[in-house]
Amino acid sequence: MGAAELSTVRALRRALHARDGHGALEALLDKVRRTPDNATFLRQVQPTVPGA
């Protein structure tokens, strides 16, 4: 995992922790299901995650 991906993952974890547990998990799972792989998922969420 590269530095940019690691930064995005860390920012995503912080953002999810700050949200409602169940709602955040459902939103995450929905987004993951709509992407073909992890790299695509991270590229798509990076612009929407503060601090990524």
Image (cartoon, helix red, strand yellow):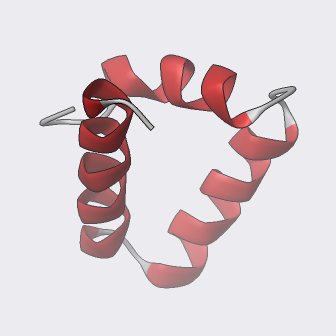
Residue at left 63%, top 26%?
Answer: 39
Q: Is residue 16 above or below residue 36?
A: below
Specify the quadrant of the image occupied by residue 47.
Answer: top left
The answer to whether 37 appears left or right of 6 in the picture is right
Q: Quadrant of the N terminus?
A: top left
> Residue 41, how many percent across, how many down?
63, 30
Residue at left 25%, top 31%?
Answer: 3
Residue at left 34%, top 62%?
Answer: 13
Q: Is residue 25 above or below residue 49?
A: below
Q: Is residue 30 above or below residue 39?
A: below
> Residue 5, how many percent across, how many down?
38, 32
The answer to whether 51 appears left or right of 21 in the picture is left
The answer to whether 42 appears left or right of 11 in the picture is right
Specify the quadrant of the image occupied by residue 52.
Answer: top left
Q: Is residue 13 above or below residue 45?
A: below
> Residue 6, how many percent across, how many down?
32, 42
> Residue 23, how many percent across, how many down?
57, 70
12, 26: nearer the viewer? 12
Specify the quadrant of the image occupied by residue 7.
Answer: top left
